[in-house]
């Protein structure tokens, strides 16, 4: 964790682009509340294959107009290089300075369509097309990406993204702080010195979280799963226990020198705000 301690902390709040008029209103209310916490930036996800292109753009530009610093996510799966460069040029023309660059997952799980196979090629394209304009943030996986052959391989592939020009990384969420500490130490030993900001998933809907975690390479520890299952559909106990667990996790990470936190807010302000306040940030 030694190199991580040297970086200034950044705090990010992630949203997804809402689908319905109601969702748009809910997100507006959530970000009004979250903006008061003064994070370093907000980010807005991008559906693989460009499925949310227009909604991502609308959300990003509306938030920019409110004076918020926004980092759009951009994904390469299913896209041509020309489409990606056009999107980058649009963001550059609007003064966006930070991009979260990921590969994305093809909807069918089949090998990716599109001209780029891996996120390191996306990072290379961003640098080739726009030089140093963007601060590039990439994804990494303390419990390793589900498609990686070995842990070592996954770290090599992460390093490729950094060597190509990424400035920092946000992790997949995790509930086991030790996985993050070990991952960061291994990255440091491999010469990766950029900030590796832990991704934090507050726990609202446990059943949904459990389904999602199986697919994305995040483990729910047995002790947490058993506790949560014991609460059945008692939402308030799930939220209250989840708040205790996630606040303690954040506390542990920051105390050990993590360079900030990135909250997967799920477009809701409540849990993130409570954790933030409990941490005294
Ligand atoms: P990569 O870095 O390309 O890695 C994918 C797999 O390929 C890994 O197993 C890796 O080890 C391997 N690999 C990488 N490079 C090579 C190489 N050169 N040769 C061989 N193997 C290689 N998804 C979205 O659709 N939209 C989003 O907005 C979005 N935002 C995200 C934000 C964060 C912080 C995180 C953690 C994930 C996000 N995702 C998003 C999910 C992400 O797209 C998936 O996890 C996807 O499966 C991998 O993306 P990646 O950028 O990590 O891919």
Image: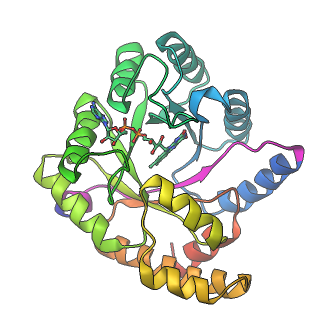
* Residue 14 image position (x, y, % from top left): 58, 51
Which residues fall within the magenta stretch?
3-21
Residue 38 place in picture, x, y as percent: 59, 58
In the rendered image, the quadrant that contains the N terminus is: bottom left
In this picture, residue 39 sits left or right of residue 52: left
Residue 168 location (% of width, % of height):
34, 44
| Residue that lies at the very extreme toward the top in this rendered image | 82
Quadrant of the rendered image containing residue 71: top right
> In the rendered image of this protein, does residue 113 appear above or below residue 148?
above
Looking at the image, which residue is at 33% across and 60% down?
143
Q: Is residue 8 left or right of residue 153?
A: right
Count of residue discs = 0
Up-down: is 127 above or below 102? Answer: above
Residue at image position (17%, 63%) is 2
**Res. 44 in view:** yes
Q: Nearer the viewer, residue 127 or 34?
A: 127
**213 or 173, which lies in front?**
213
Q: Residue at x 25, y 46 (%)?
A: 149
Kindly tell me whether residue 263 is visible in this rendering: no
Residue under the image location 67 percent in, 36 percent down: 60
Residue 236: percent from left, percent from top:
72, 85
Q: Residue furthest right?
A: 21
In magenta segment, residue 17? yes
């Amino acid at each position: 964790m030694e190199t991580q301690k040297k970086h200034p902390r950044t705090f990010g709040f992630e949203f997804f682009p809402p689908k319905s008029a109601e969702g748009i209103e809910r997100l507006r209310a959530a970000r009004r509340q979250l903006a008061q916490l003064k994070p370093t930036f907000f980010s807005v996800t991008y559906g693989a294959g460009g499925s949310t292109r227009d909604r991502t753009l609308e959300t990003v530009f509306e938030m920019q107009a409110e004076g918020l610093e926004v980092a759009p996510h951009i994904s390469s799966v299913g896209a041509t290089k020309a489409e990606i460069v056009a999107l980058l040029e649009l963001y550059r023309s609007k003064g966006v300075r930070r991009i979260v660059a990921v590969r994305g997952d093809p909807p069918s799980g089949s090998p990716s369509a599109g001209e780029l196979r891996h996120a390191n090629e996306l990072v290379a394209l961003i640098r080739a097309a726009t030089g140093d304009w963007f601060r590039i943030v990439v994804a990494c996986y303390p419990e390793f990406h589900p498609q990686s052959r070995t842990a070592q391989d996954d770290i090599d592939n992460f390093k490729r993204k950094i060597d190509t020009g990424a400035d920092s990384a946000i992790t997949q969420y995790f509930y086991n702080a030790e996985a993050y500490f070990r991952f960061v130490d291994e990255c440091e030993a491999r010469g990766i010195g950029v900030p590796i900001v832990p991704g934090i998933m507050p726990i609202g809907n446990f059943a949904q979280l459990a389904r999602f975690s199986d697919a994305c390479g995040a483990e729910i520890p047995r002790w947490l799963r058993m506790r949560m299952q014991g609460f059945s559909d008692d939402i308030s106990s799930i939220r209250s226990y989840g708040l205790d667990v996630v606040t303690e996790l954040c506390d542990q990470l920051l105390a050990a020198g993590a360079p900030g936190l990135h909250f997967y807010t799920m477009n809701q302000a409540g849990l993130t705000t409570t954790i933030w306040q409990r941490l005294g940030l």
